[in-house]
Every structure is written in structure tokens, then in C-alpha cells.
Image (cartoon, rainbow, N blue to C red):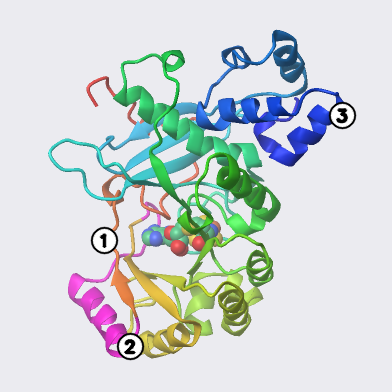
Amino acid sequence: MPTDIKNLSRAELTAWFVERKLPVYRVDQLLQWLYERRVTGWDQMTNLPKSLRETLADEFSLHTHTLAGVEGSRDTTQKSLWRLRDGAFIESVLIPANPALFGEAADRHTLCVSTQVGCAYGCKFCASGLDGWKRNLEPAEIIEQVLSTERLQSKSTSEEPDHARTTSPRLVNNLVIMGMGEPLANYDNLIKALKILNTEYHIGARKITVSTSGLAPEIRRLADEPHQFRLAISLHGATDEVRSRIMPVNRKYPLEVLTEACAYYQRRKGKMITFEYILIAGVNDHPDQTGPLADLSRRLHAKVNLIPYNKVEGLPWERPTEAAQDAFVEALRQRGVTATLRREKGHDIAAACGQLRLKNSTTTDEIRIPSPTQ
Ligand code: SAH
Ligand code: SF4
């Protein structure tokens, strides 16, 4: 199977054109078709000569993800289940920046994308890793989640046929790499995808947040990249004892090693890091975690995002009472920490981060296909 054209950066495409003595201004045209017009077939690239389109079609594939199901509506958090070309399933979640009012769609959206099929890290609370790791996503498969989402949304907002439009309005302004998989375990493909999205789809690096369970060496690598990506750490425990119990990765990179890597990131980028901290009743919500958590946050200039645990089918854990959640956030604030308690969007449709469960064909029945009225 030839490689997908979206696996190639602008520099690689240019080299390919130069090697064949083809005019390099065609690269710009090609990239516009791919990332601005977001076409799905070579034939739609009407300003490229037919012979060039044929050569491209011989050498590369041009894949789109197949929509296998959608949950939620366009005005609220919406989860898409995509079938990849090998039959694997991944999910992306579109989150409106503000709750849409009076039936009008919000104009700013964050897309949560997946980087792997499954996850190898086996955090005890997380649905993504329950069935283990299957494979890494290619750069094109990461990128295509954005493009397929845009196409899906523009279909539902416009009566105009795709080919009649000269520019395609954009919906996604922020990316969070918080879907299925551990992004930094698929480092090269992730970075390549983000760089292509940054230069060709024009999404600012500051609008992209990479979330990791704490792969210290790759955090340092990310710090050395020229791009100003934002970093979120899935902390979920402020002592090694608590963290190791729920996140096996902590045995490999305990808090001291992790926080040194975070400090390095912080020094290199001068950016505030975010600690994600799920509150799980009786597991990590004891007030004695707030002291060490506050110390870590102050030391690293990190803000803390508290997330009440989203129940995962088959796992025994629960979120704490709202009073316990409020007490936890208040204890952090009293210690001078910037802390927010994030009431998750999409909780009801199992689309909140951490609930992207590996799907297979036997479970797709659970996904509702949208009716034309949605
Ligand atoms: N592997 C990366 C990226 C996935 S992000 C990481 O772990 O950071 C998914 C986020 O959702 C992480 O912060 C994860 O810890 C969190 N999460 C996982 N399961 C959850 C659950 N049941 N409820 C709330 N958040 C959860
Ligand atoms: Fe993987 Fe992140 Fe889930 Fe842990 S929290 S199992 S690293 S996706």
C-alpha cells in the first residue's frame, strides 16, 4: 500500500517534485487542496495537470477516515468514531468553546485527537488502555482526524456542494492531544503531524496541548523542539505511593524524574505547565495529597486542572462528592495554587477525555448514527 500523501511534509514533497523536475509551485497548490480545501480525491485538484494527478495517484494514497458513528450533537460535545483503513477504530471529540446558545453553533472549537489505537500504559482508571495497545497512528491518520471532522461539520452546516466553494470555513481552533493513546510514545509521528498541521492547516503551536502520562525523556525532547506546544501532565497523584498505585508509568519515571523533566520544559519554554488531576473517591482525593500537590505546582509554576472521575464501565471507581471536590480545590487555592475544577463536557456520552474506549466492530452498535435532523 503506498504511503498517504499527508505523511509528507512540505520539504519532503518539494524534494519529490524537484527529483522529478516538476515545478515546485505545484507543491503549494497541492497543499492547498489537501489542507485548505480538504478534498478527498485527486480528481478534485482541478488546477493540477491530469498527468501530475495520475503520477500522484500512482505513488501515494489519499485516505480519509470512514465515519462509523457519532454521538452528541453539533451544538454540544460530539464524539466521532472513525474506522481506519485497516479496520481499526479511533475516536475524536469536538468540544465547543462555549455552550452554544439558542440553537446556534459555537464558532470556536477544540478537537481532542487520538494518537494510537489503544494504549500500552495501563493506567488503572482509564478506558483507553483496557484492551491494550494495538498500533501507532501514522502522521496522516492523526492529521486526518482534523480534516475529517471539518468535512463532517461543513456538510452539516452547508447546502452548498463541496466543489462550489472556493474556501472552506474552519471550525477547529484548538487541539488537545488527549484522545486514545500516549502521544509521547508515538513521538516522531506525533511531532510530524503537529508540524504539518501548524504550517499547512495554520493552527498555532500555542493552540496545541500535548498531554502525557509522564514519559520524562520525551518531555525533554519536546522541550528541545522549536515549537511552543503546550504541555499537560496527567499527574493524578502527588506522592509516588499514590501515583504508582494507579499509574504503572510512575515506577519507570517516578515523581522526581518526572518533575525534573517538567522543570526543564518550563525553563526552555517559559510556559506554564498544566497538571491534570482526576479526583477518584478514596484513591487520590485525600486531603493529605493537597500539600505535596501544592508544593509540586508552586515549584514548577504549574496550574492544576481537577477533573471529577468519569465512571468507566467495568472499573470500580467513583468520583468524590461535590463537597469533597470543592474542599480539595479550596485547599489548593489556599496554598496559593491556581486550580480549576473542570466540569467535563461530554461526560454523558462517554466522550470526555479518558473515556475513549477501544472499539471494535462488535461494539459499534452502541454508536448512534446521526439522523438528518441533528
Ligand atoms: N495518554 C495521555 C493522553 C490521553 S489524555 C495522558 O494520559 O495524558 C486523557 C486524559 O484523561 C488524561 O489526563 C487521563 O489521565 C484522563 N482520564 C483517563 N481516564 C479518565 C477518567 N475515567 N475520567 C477522567 N479523566 C480520565
Ligand atoms: Fe494511556 Fe493516558 Fe489512559 Fe494512561 S491515561 S492508559 S497513558 S491514555
Indicate which disc residue 76 carries.
none
In this view, the residue in front, 173 or 116, is 173
Residue 246 horizontal/vertical position (percent) = 49, 71
Q: Quarter of the image holding residue 229?
A: bottom right
Mark 1 and mark 3 lie on one chain; the one further toward the N terminus is 3
Residue at the image point whose x is 22% and y is 22% from the top? 373
How dense is the environment of label 3, judged by Cα within 10 Å: few (below 14), some, or many (20 and up)? few
Mark 2 and mark 1 lie on one chain; the one further toward the N terminus is 2
How many angstroms separate mark 1 from mark 3 (CA)? 53 Å
> Would residue 54 appear left or right of 119 to someone viewing this image?
right
Indicate which disc residue 343 carries.
1
How dense is the environment of label 1, judged by Cα within 10 Å: few (below 14), some, or many (20 and up)? few
Q: Secondary structure at mark 3?
A: helix
Does the magenta portion include 146? no
Pointer 1 with pointer 3, Cβ within 8 A: no
Residue type at the position of mark 1: Arg
1 or 3: mark nearer the eye: 3
Pointer 2 with pointer 1, Cβ within 8 A: no
The magenta segment is 312-337
Residue 114 horizontal/vertical position (percent) = 52, 46
Residue 160 horizontal/vertical position (percent) = 35, 15
Q: Which residue is mark 2?
A: 336
Residue 198 vertical position relative to residue 103 in the rendered view, above or below? below
Residue at the image point whose x is 56% and y is 62% from the top? 228
> Would residue 82 appear left or right of 218 to someone viewing this image?
left
Indicate which disc residue 19 carries.
3
3 or 2: mark nearer the eye: 3
> Would residue 293 appear left or right of 132 to someone viewing this image?
left
Mark 3 and mark 2 lie on one chain; the one further toward the N terminus is 3
Residue at the image point whose x is 53% and y is 83% from the top? 240
